[in-house]
Every structure is written in structure tokens, then in C-alpha cells.
Image: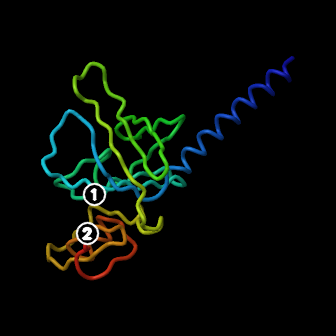
Amino acid sequence: MKLFLFSLLFVVQMCQMDSITKSSDELSGQYILQNVSCFCFFEDYDFRNNQLWVFPSKNLIVSKGNVNDGVYISPPNEAEQYNLINGVLTLADSSKEYVVDFNGDEVALTFIDNPLIADDEITYYFKKGEAKGNCVNPENIKLNTACTKEYDPVCGCDGLTYSNPCTATNYGGVSAYTRGACSN
């Protein structure tokens, strides 16, 4: 009887691991924000400047875009640990939780709202980007690095324009860039 119960517990655990692994591997690489649904107002806002990078092998997520003007699920341009279990993405530092809904090359992240707070419902709609997975390295992001304020624009492999090579490498974590602003 003990052997039967142990075997049953083992089989149940293995089924759960398959579900976790499949979801984690499915959410990988670059995602470009397409739209946001919430009780908030965005006047002519171009959501495509906001990106989400997911690194499942390291359980890291990076929200990318303009630090001063953006819509993010986590602090911009900072790598944050996450867990994705049974379709719920949990950010380690903030404990924010999002229900993940996959639809082909699109992903919707719906914030699991606090019932005690009115109008905190928000859903982010992302589309899979074309940048290669190694374009951004979260370990290259060093926000404490002092970069000059000179404007010598470069286009990162992630499709975002950075003010100079130092900001592209240290604030954006990009592994490659070309001279000049990106043509969006």
C-alpha cells in the first residue's frame, strides 16, 4: 500500500513538472507591448517602445524601454527573478502576480488584482519580437555604471534607440548595436 501511494504521489508530481516546464519554455525571448487594457488613460501612446524579455533558463525577466515614460510589469531595465507555475507568473521582488495566456505568438499578462483596491485591473498584450534570444544579456545590465550624457545614438539589436553605446550596453544590456537611431 505504501508503495502504491508513493508511486501515485510520484506520478502526480511528474505531471505538474511537465506543465511548469512547458509554460516556462513557451515564454522565452523578446515580446513587444502592443496594448494595455485598464482603467487608465494613454493619449496617443506608442506601446511598441516597451518590451519584455524573458530568460527561462535563468528565471529572469527584464522590462525594457524609456525609464521616464513607460508601462512596465517590473522595474524598467532591471533583471528580476520570476516563477511561472500553472499559468501564473510571480515576480520575486514585488510578489506581483499575472495570469499568462498564450495565443500563438501573442501573450497576455493579466494582473491578479487586489480585491481591496478599486480599478487596479490591468492586462498587457505582447507580441513575440524578432530579435534573437542572445541580443540582450541580463547580466550586462549595470544601472550603476556612469555613462556620459553625450548624444551619439545607436540602434540596439532589440530595436530600441539608445543615446550612446555606453547606455546601450550597460542600461539596455544589448550585445550588439549599429550607429544611428533605429528606424521604426
Q: According to the image, label 1 marks what residue?
A: 48
Compared with 52, 95 (above or below) is: above
- Element assignment for label 2: loop
Residue at x 69%, y 32% (from the top left corner): 13
Where is residue 6 drawn, in percent x and y?
79, 25
- Quarter of the figure with residue 138: bottom left
Compared with 101, 116 (above or below) is: above
Where is residue 51 drawn, in percent x and y?
33, 56
Q: According to the image, label 2 marks what residue?
A: 184
User: Contact, CB < 8 Å: mark 1 with mark 2?
Assistant: yes
Residue at x 25%, y 74% (from the top left corner): 183
Three-letter amino acid code of the residue under disc 1: Arg
Residue at x 24%, y 70% (from the top left corner): 162
- Element assignment for label 1: helix
- Quarter of the figure with residue 114: top left
Q: Quadrant of the C terminus?
A: bottom left
Where is residue 12 drawn, in percent x and y?
71, 29
Gap in Å between the C-alphas at discs 1 and 2? 9 Å
Compared with 121, 25 (above or below) is: below
Q: Neighbour class for label 2 at 10 Å: few (<14), some, many (≥20)?
A: few
- Furthest-front residue in this view: 104
Where is residue 139 drawn, in percent x and y?
42, 62
- Furthest-top residue in this view: 1
46 vs 168, left or right, is: left
Q: Nearer the viewer, residue 45 or 114?
A: 45
Three-letter amino acid code of the residue under disc 2: Asn
- Quarter of the figure with residue 165: bottom left
